[in-house]
Image (cartoon, helix red, strand yellow):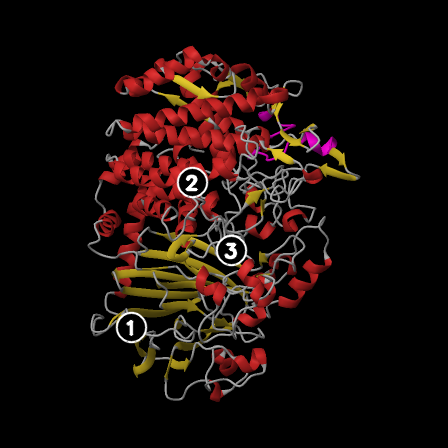
Amino acid sequence: MISRLARLHWEYMNAERMRLEEAARREKHWRRWGPYVSERAWGTVREDYSAKGAAWEYTPHTHARFKAYRWGEDGIGGWCDNHQRICLALALWNQHDPYLKERLFGLAGGEGNHGEDVKEYYYYLDATPTYSYAKFLYKYPQTEFLYGWLAAENRRRGKTASEFELIDTGIFDQDRYFDVVVEYAKADVDDTLVRITAFNRGPDPAPLHILPTVWFRNRWSWGYAGRLRPKLQKIGPGLISLEEQKLGRLTMWFEQSPRLLFTENETNVQRLYSQPNTGRFVKDAFHEYLIKGREDAVNPDLRGTKACASYLMTIPPGESRQVRLRLGPEGALPEDPAAMFEDIFTKRVEEADEFYSFACDRLSPDGRRVQRQALAGLLWSRQFYHYVIDQWLNGDPAGPTPPATRKGGRNSAWIHLFNEDVLTMPDKWEYPWYAAWDTAFHMIPLAMIDPDAAKSELARFLREWFMHPNGQIPAYEWKFDDVNPPVHAWSCWRVYQIDAKLTGRKDTAFLERVFHKLLMNFTWWVNRKDTLGNNVFEGGFLGLDNIGLFDRSSPAPGGGIIEQSDGTSWMAMYCLNMLKIALELAQVRPVYEDIASKFFEHFLFISAAMNSLGDGGLWDDADGFYFDRLRLPTGRSIPLKVRSMVGLIPLFAVDTLEPETMARLPGFRGRMQWFIDNRPDLCRDIASMTREGVGERRLLCFVPRDRLRRILRCMLDESEFLSPYGLRSLSKFHEKNPYTLRLDGTEYRVEYEPAESRTYLFGGNSNWRGPVWFPVNYLMIESLQKLNHYWGESLTAEIPTGSGVKMNLGDVAAELSRRLGRLFLRDVNGRRPVFGGAQKFQNDPNFRDHLLFYEYFHGDNGAGIGASHQTGWTALVAKLLQQSGE
């Protein structure tokens, strides 16, 4: 639901809106530059050329400062063009660290007691969709950074202990740290102003080196013809000339005419591999120059492919110092680059405030802060992503031949994949690669502020250089052929709706374009994930890593197959999404009525299988819940009675048919009536094919009313799924009642875990056994809204169960939405549940309003867990605040 205020905002042509319109019409490339630099390029699949796919070990953090990356760059608060030819980022030194701080530190997958984890504090504070303004905050300790202690203590701790974080070391005690704020403002498409402000929060004067760095991504060392080496060189006091094959000539200006240092963005092969370097100057030269005092490490000729300005300042306690830079086309910068500098920043901040004025009137200042930082984090999480599988598998002309095992190893079946795009990442440090189903959720809040970008990104995943020729959408770079829940069609439909409500224009061309590719993907699912051909699906792990007894991406125990309640429900939901798209297109092109009937029929078959196949389908009448079922080769069938999100996902397969749509499409209406009259076996469990609901609507949902009531009682019970902060992924019932199954001499067990996983299943760093996570909560809220759209006041539920307080399902949805919002909002005591027991985060004025949007949240107290900058799907809170308030 889009508020009237938001619609008025979109119709009002403010400055940022004008830039978006110019970008959409391709008049001005406002998105060419942005914060597209990753926060971790080491430890990624792309940089892994090992024989067995040991990505974390092949390019570890200790190698990152010496090695020129092949596929992408990383940095702190970075900025680059949309093909990452030129990069800017922040480098710092406090005169105590053993290393120049050029990138964020964290633990690799096998180092942390709960898997990989960044061990720094940084925040995305603001951004507009065109990046006309963007703001980033990094907290840099004034004493030696505790790399060794963080790694050793996390290795020492077991799975039952919490992660050891940087705040736990005491390094921020007495406020001995710098707040380093990096701001970007665009004077024009290619004219970027940079303002770096360092605040000394400590009690004593403290030295700080600020080294704003500019460099070229290394595209020239791999042996491909036509890739010329770009050039950086000093051309005057505080001035560097940049020359690049595609971008042409640019000039970078540094205020105060600091010393300029130059080197090459080349691997230090002597340091890494004990081989002679091809040249004198290598990637880690500024570390060697500044910290080790090696004057010969930098190029005295003041040229290269990597450069920085060296600023040394001593900042008194409570004061700040500032550095200003500017990058733009040669000849386009004003004679005095500082001219109008502050005026441009002031104007861009005012324009950002104006653009974000669409927040609901009912939001408090704190609610607006949460919403805006969520959207800022989403925009900062966009990253240049480069991965060409054919080149990666075969190696580069100038590089060593990769091990033969790679030809049949990871992603070897995806040789068509050629990615060189700016995409939205789940987390630019912990997940610095796209995940298809994460992207589907990212696009919902992105569509609130930039629907064109959301539509473009969704369509991109269906293009031939992403989608497999067999119709599969790539999952994520660790395993492109894994299966994520098929939610792409849902996201395309929802973004289409949001776009239409915001702009007043229906982009049916977008809808038709994606629909044809989604048909291919739907067919892939039907052909590959319905082993027995009975319309019950075995999708794999489906994003629910640890929710069941088994690793569902691996063969099932005993040689059986797991018929999945969620996998089958996801496919039923997919049918309904495709049905809605086909019905929408049929209103402008009647030929789509036929394909709409096909998806209606397929939904009926899935519904019948889910509810009635064999020994009762996947519904268990005694427990009043849907469960997965293990079918063994012997014919034995075992219901896996885990009370988890798997049994709630059937509610996602719901939608309504509007009477106006039915009236306009007589062909579809007639075929639907034929099924009602002639196939009662398929229609009997559908609620409700024949009964007209509110506004004469029809309901498509394979959970009949009596079963719906039973599921809702369980779902809204605070001793089961309902937490103060949304729905848990596993019922708290299993805290005192673990579920066990003994099979072939092995006991499998599921217990309620409200926080980090205590097992090594799926690596042990993913836990859906109890925490609250946004994607399924958001889909449940939408499902309840649809059910209420049909049932209205004729169907209510107690929330919480047993409280005596009854609401219609629309109000239940709003209550769930507000519970999720409470994770981030200050409570009556001024505390934010997301910060848990971290007192500095809760109380310190320089921490408490800087928000982190975590991967998931403690199932009982709401504390943030997992990836700390999972702004992608957790940015859904911005949409929830807009539609349901606080």
Q: Which mark is residue 665?
A: none
Q: For mark 2, does the 10 Å Cα neighbourhood hold few (<14), some (14 to 19), or many (20 or more) residues?
A: many
Q: Is residue 706 magenta?
A: no
Residue 808 position in % (x across, y down): 47, 18
Mark 3: which amino acid?
Asn
Please state which of the two labelled residues, at mark 2 or mark 1, is closer to the viewer. 2
Residue identifier under label 2: 521
> Does residue 507 sit above or below 669 in this rendering?
below
Mark 2: which amino acid?
Asn
The earlier-in-sequence mark between 2 and 3 is 3
Q: Nearer the viewer, residue 319 or 471?
A: 471
Q: For mark 1, does the 10 Å Cα neighbourhood hold few (<14), some (14 to 19), or many (20 or more) residues?
A: few
**Dots 2, 3 in contact, CB < 8 A:** no
Please state which of the two labelled residues, at mark 3 or mark 1, is closer to the viewer. 3
Mark 1: which amino acid?
Gln
Residue 589 position in % (x across, y down): 24, 30
Q: Nearer the viewer, residue 880 or 82?
A: 82
Q: Is residue 83 left or right of 799 when viewed as pictured?
A: left
**Dots 3, 1 in contact, CB < 8 A:** no
Residue identifier under label 1: 245
Task: Please identify the dominant SS of the magenta region.
Answer: loop
Q: For mark 3, does the 10 Å Cα neighbourhood hold few (<14), some (14 to 19), or many (20 or more) residues?
A: many
Residue at point 47%, 89% (across, down): 296
**On the image, which quarter does residue 521 sit in?**
top left
> Does residue 312 sit above or below 680 in this rendering?
below
Q: Secondary structure at mark 2?
A: helix
Q: CA distance from mark 2 to mark 3?
A: 18 Å
Residue identifier under label 3: 411
